[in-house]
Amino acid sequence: MNLAHRLTAEFIGTLVLVFGGCGSAVISAGYPGLGIAFLGVSIAFGLTVLSMVYAVGHLSGGHFNPAVTLGAAAAGRFSWKDVPAYIVAQVLGAIAGSALLYWIAIGRDGFSTAGPNGFATNGYAQNSPDGYNLMSAAVIEVVLTCIFLIVILGATDVRAPSGYAGIAIGLALTLIHLASIPVTNTSVNPARSTGPALFAWQALPQLWLFWVAPIVGALIAGFAYKFLFGGPHEPERVSAAPTVPTPEPGV
């Protein structure tokens, strides 16, 4: 696929990830008596990434996350020259998804983006859902992003079973959210953090952490995976989409 098609896929995938995941938190999590709570939000994030990996992952590699793009490049799975363009597309997709969610959310009387749960923003201290400090937030974001990248790199390795990577990645993201929503509202994705923060100004001063920590975790995972496991891999690709056989001529 040419770069324009790949960037479009990254834009759409990140838009759906942010709209679906953050939308479940903003609209459905706290609904009186029927709210989906932490478990539902965790599953929603896992389902959005799983769905979009199979929908457009075969076009772009299905990153939808600047940390994944950088981790893939560190592991030798993705070209460094395409990293800036991918990150721009992902951030724009996250902003578009957040704008769409905001447009819907303001239709309810009394809606506010204030507070740690107002617009699914990420934060620490006063902006942490359960008041966790900067150190706790930094550690959990680095560690969980590192784990997420290890799962992605392992599941998409040519030595892994083909066609199942999207399921492993979606379940991993679900588990990550179950472990960390009370701490930071779960980022592990700088684009996901940036989109909502632009509509909830109290989150902007802390946004730096949700770029630095996920990127550090992703780079650790990328370089470590290449060093520890090496061996065959697919250059220029980190895709969780199933492989589609090429038809024989005339089919």
Image (tube, grey):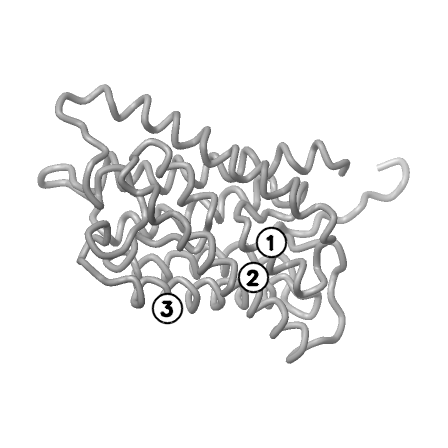
User: What residue is shown with label 3?
Assistant: 139
Figure check: 106 above or below 234? above
Q: Secondary structure at mark 2?
A: helix
What's the CA distance linking mark 3 and mark 2?
20 Å
> Which quarter of the image is occupied by the C terminus?
top right
Q: Secondary structure at mark 3?
A: helix
Disc 3 marks a residue whose amino acid type is Val
Return the disc, 3 or 2, that comes first in the chain's sequence: 3
Asked if the residue under mark 2 is in contact with the one under mark 3, i.e. CB atoms within 8 Å, the reply is no
Disc 2 marks a residue whose amino acid type is Ile
Say whether residue 251 is left or right of residue 155.
right
Label 1 crowd bin: few (<14), some (14–19), many (20+), radius 10 Å: many
User: What residue is shown with label 2?
Assistant: 152
Return the disc, 1 or 3, that comes first in the chain's sequence: 3
What's the CA distance linking mark 2 and mark 1?
8 Å
Say whether residue 150 is left or right of residue 59.
left
Asked if the residue under mark 1 is in contact with the one under mark 2, i.e. CB atoms within 8 Å, the reply is yes
Q: Position of residue 61 (x, y in %)?
A: 65, 48
Q: Which mark is residue 240?
A: 1
Question: Residue placed at 33% from the left, 31% from the top?
Answer: 199
Q: Residue furthest left?
A: 33
Return the disc, 2 or 1, that comes first in the chain's sequence: 2
Between circles 1 and 3, the one closer to the viewer is 3
